[in-house]
Amino acid sequence: MNLPDSSMPLVNHLRELRKRLIISSVTVAVVFAGLWFFARDMHEILAAPLQALLVDSDGSALIATGIASPFLVPFKLTMVLAVLISVPVLLHQIWAFVSPGLYQHERKFAMPLLFSSIVLFYSGVAFCYFVVLPLVYGFFTGFASEGITLMPDIANHLDFTLKLIFAFGIAFEIPIATALLVKSGAVSRETLQQKRAYVFLTCFIIGMFITPPDMFSQTILAVPMYLLFEAGLIASRFLGQPPISRTPEDLEESPDQTSTDQ
């Protein structure tokens, strides 16, 4: 029994890809235009956890050491926020591009996965802003000795903060990655359970590379990563057994060639 011919000419794939890229780009541009009017306010909100600590110190404040920093920092922040806010649309465009090549049972599995990944990513961003940043800033500013005036540069502060935010946003996707590994059959849940010690060590190694060079920041990322790994193991119990091979029903089932355009 042969698989149905679900191939499309390369030019049609390129046209579909171009369409999805245009929609994604326009979405980000529109969101950016709407946010630009509030660029200064958004930067003040982002800097609020650090400003709350600096206000208690005489002479401490955020400063701009570059001539263009007062413009470039809000611009960069607005662009990053535009992408973050557009994540649901961007993921939907990816889904619309790949879904015609999926079988029906694969789509039923992918849709909850897509929704869960969006929720987890935003949860990681919120966790970083409301929990991690105040702790990290408090840890570092607490080491300032008497006579030292703490005056962080706004560009360095933005890079530091965005690095942590994206690190936690991506780290919160670990349950999805773990569940996918088990569901796809790439590795069994029992194997992952036996390798817990190696996973725990790997979390600290990753935390060492993507956080500031201190044990506190490394730990505050590594521990949630490991807990999220355990959550992924629990979630994998409810996904059923991994597929061993295509069933006759799969072979007879033809992927929908109509692109999902919503």
Image (cartoon, helix red, strand yellow):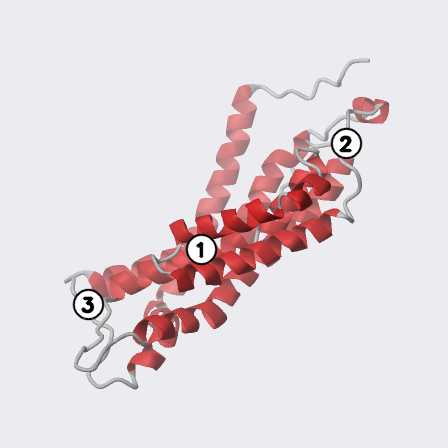
Left or right: 183 as drawn, with respect to 21: right
Observer-nearest residue: 229 or 156?
229
Q: Which mark is residue 64?
A: 3
- Residue placed at 57% from the left, 51% from the top? 173
Left or right: residue 27 compared with residue 233: left
Element at badge 3? Answer: loop
Which kind of residue does numbered mark 2 sit on? Pro
Q: Which residue is mark 2?
A: 243
State how far apart marks 3 and 2 are (Cα).
Answer: 56 Å
Image position of 249 with respect to 229: above or below: above
- In the rendered image, residue 91, in percent from the top left (x then y), is placed at 56, 46
| Marks 3 and 1 in Cβ contact (< 8 Å) | no
Residue 244 can be seen in this image: yes
Residue at the extreme top of the image, as rendered: 1
The residue most toward the right is 249
Which quadrant does the N terminus fall into? top right
Task: Kindly report which numbered mark, 3 or 2, lies closer to the viewer in this rendering.
Answer: 2
Type of amino acid at the residue the image marks with label 3: Ala
How far apart are labels 1 and 2 at the CA level?
33 Å
Q: Earlier in the sequence, mark 3 or mark 1?
A: 3
Residue at left offset 69%, top offset 35%: 184
Residue 194, given in percent of the width and then of the height, sits at 67, 43
x, y percent for residue 234: 72, 53
- Whichever of labels 1 and 2 marks the residue nearer the N terminus, that label is 1
Q: CA distance from mark 3 to mark 1?
A: 23 Å
Mark 1 neighbour class, 10 Å CA radius: few under 14, some 14 to 19, many 20 or more: some
Residue 52 rendering spot, x and y as whole percentages: 35, 81
Is 135 on the left-hand or right-hand side of 101?
Answer: left
Note whether 115 is above or below 244 in the view shown: below
Residue that numbered label 1 is attached to: 166
Name the image quarter holding residue 257.
Answer: top right
- Which amino acid type is shown beneath numbered disc 1? Phe
